Image (cartoon, rainbow, N blue to C red):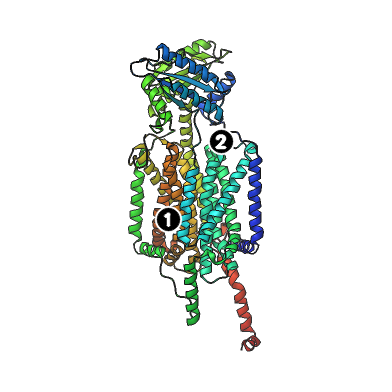
Amino acid sequence: MATFLYKLGRFAFRRRGFVALIWVALLAVAGVGAATASQPANDSFSIPGTEAQKAFDLLEQRFPGGNADGATARVVFHAPSGEKMTDPDNKAVVTKTVAELKASSPQVASVADPYQARAVSKDGTTAYILTSYKVNAMELEDPAKDGLKEVGEKAEKSGLSVQIGGDALQEMPETGSTEIIGIAISAVVLAITFGSLVAAGLPLLTALIGVGIGISSITALATTLGLSTTTSTLAMMIGLAVGIDYALFIVSRYRAELAEGRDREEAAGRAVGTAGSAVVFAGLTVVIALVGLAVVNIPMLTKMGFAAAGTVVIAVLIAISLIPAVLGFAGKRVFGRRARRRMEERAAAAAASGADAPEEKPNMGTRWARFVLRRPVLVLLVAVLGLGAAALPAASLELGLPDDGSQPVSSQKRQAYDMISEGFGPGSNGPLMVVADAKGSDDARGAAQQVRKTITGLDGVAAVSPATFNKAGDTATITVISKYKPSSIDTENLVGDIRDEASGFKSGTGAEVLVTGQTAMNIDISQKLNDALVPYLVLVVGLAFLLLMVVFRSVLVPLKAALGFLLSVVAALGAVVAVFQWGWLADLFGVEETGPIMSMMPIFMIGVVFGLAMDYEVFLVTRMREAYVHGERPGQAVVTGFRHGARVVTAAAVIMISVFAGFIGSSESMIKMIGFGLATAVLFDAFVVRMAIVPAVLALLGKAAWWLPRWLDRALPNVDVEGEGLRKQLEQPSADRQRDRDSDPDAELTRV
């Protein structure tokens, strides 16, 4: 592989105008395709294989036009002190609001009058209008949302306190400002790392081109492939991250080759042949992690994973083709003026003395590696114990999906949530819908009555509505209000209790009972994600282990990489639990409400962080492997790897931490949690695992680190990531010429 990439790098450098033109053309074609494509449909969020989804599908059949999974909004009214919502003036405002809501949008399915739907609190101070829509929250159009807001604002002018809750006003968080901040920080870090604005600009330029092609392609193919606007979210974040990283690796190696005295084309070829090989395999680990999200079997998550994987593939192709082409345009400006002057002075001093250029002073990476080699046991113990301590809170991890109760206290959704909790009880914010399929029952009405009676007697039930039948009279829905808030463990237990009674209903009445609603759906999603966690982890880590075994020709190095990654992810989850579940340092990070950790966090962190962690592992350890294969002692190879790679890996990690940390400032608790979790995981993995545990373990293992059974060595393909085959090939012509001269006596006379 190294030989092929070497030739590709030299070709791209020589034909830089042609290669750059191809990528610009691809960007233009993708952009035109995106601009002319029809508007993509939003995802109809479904969770195949869950009871809640089965119930939704049944309701679609038995209650046509009922829109069981449609968006809902609660317009909550609270009367001023001394007044009640049953007062004539206040009642008139609510009645008028009901009429205005019905006329606010064609997407409105139904509007429940609180005075008929028993949606007035016992003390009479609070009432709410439940508005249902024909489409889910992701498909709700802006005019419908605007109409809802206008009706609420108009009602508030009457003197009543009016807040709007529910998922109808759910919107995708705006991330543009955080991306700009991330790119700005990346530019600063790159400029400091390279000491050259040109070298700093190259990774940003090529990463933006790659993300532009990827996102435009997703938009252009959205209608054809059934992708939604949310599909590009993960693709943009990951594409930008790896695009900068991969370009950073190639440019850094190119500068190192130039510093060793090679001409520019040769330096480009060697940079792509060596660092490019590491980029290809690092990219494969990211692709495996993202495509592996299909194991969860949540369609939207699968689409996001495949879209992001496609963007990573584009980033890899750009790194091994466009980067060497752009380096050809940059010339010597990849070095800053001060660096160029130092190189010229060293070259002049070497020419004057007739000796090799003096070695540069040990950099920070070299000094740190030597320190670890002197005290590997101490460094390993401190690092492992530190991560272990950070991981302890993960033992108390509680997973769930956040509701409006986790929103900032100042938000309208949170205030509506609190008003309903105070007036009707916390369970009213997330009612459960029990569906009784009595098609196989002789007495459908009697079966529904029996179901209602049994549920009423369960612990944790606050209220149970009468059964509502469809036109055929064979299916009924019963609304159940829990005594507890929707995201609580107690409500989850209540759902489990109702489902446990289902078998008794089936045998006793012939009716099949299913529990659904947004609360039940959230519970089922969490369970599905929990069930998929171990298979996903085995798949991703297992395939990556095999891939790294091919790369490093070792059993222990990939094992160490996988175990180190798991340690950093568990430690990051522990930090998330401490802040967002226990409330430690909550004020510092702006966490207003603690509660269960988002159920998607473990799988999301594994998928994203694993890919980025393997980037750092491959780039750092490949350089060590390269030095070891070229004859250096194991300890010396570790120092060489850190001398060339530590600065680059540090810069890449700082960039990623900055990008992810920018999301901590989001007002959305989910986005805040994701940003904190990813930033913490990268911090632990890059600076504790890769920079401390990796060199300490390699120092203790010595030559055993690179051990591979002979039978396995023969079975595994030799992809030559470290460039040993390339090096032999490049040295062969000069060796052949030397042998020819030695065997030809006339050649010596000619030289004289």
Locate residue 522, reporting x and y percent. 47, 30
Up-down: is 662 above or below 649? Answer: above
| Residue plotted at (39% across, 57% down) | 692
Q: Is residue 725 visible?
A: no
| Residue plotted at (59% across, 70% down) | 730
Disc 1 and disc 2 in contact, CB within 8 angstroms: no
Q: Is residue 223 left or right of residue 111?
A: right
Q: Is residue 326 left or right of residue 355?
A: right
What residue does disc 1 label? 690
Pick whichever, 620 or 328, lies toward us: 328
Pick whichever, 527 or 642, lies toward us: 642
Locate residue 611, reporting x and y percent. 50, 49
Q: Label 2: how many residues lie within 10 Å, few (<14), some (14-19) or many (20+)?
A: some
Up-down: is 422 above or below 575? Answer: above
Q: Is residue 659 visible?
A: yes
Answer with the quarter of the image where residue 456 lies: top left
| Residue plotted at (51% across, 10% down) | 445
Q: Label 1: how many residues lie within 10 Å, few (<14), some (14-19) or many (20+)?
A: many
What residue does disc 2 label? 299
Question: Which amino acid, mark 1?
Answer: Arg
Locate residue 15, reporting x and y percent. 65, 62
- Helix, strand or loop status at disc 1: helix
Answer with the quarter of the image where residue 136 lies: top right
> How many labels sit on residues?
2
Residue 74 is marked as: none
Which quadrant, please, contains the N terminus? bottom right
Locate residue 133, reporting x and y percent. 54, 23
Q: Is residue 89 left or right of residue 714?
A: left
Point out the tag, 1 or 2, that comes first from the N-terminus: 2
Question: Which amino acid, mark 2?
Answer: Pro
Which quadrant, please, contains the C terminus? bottom right
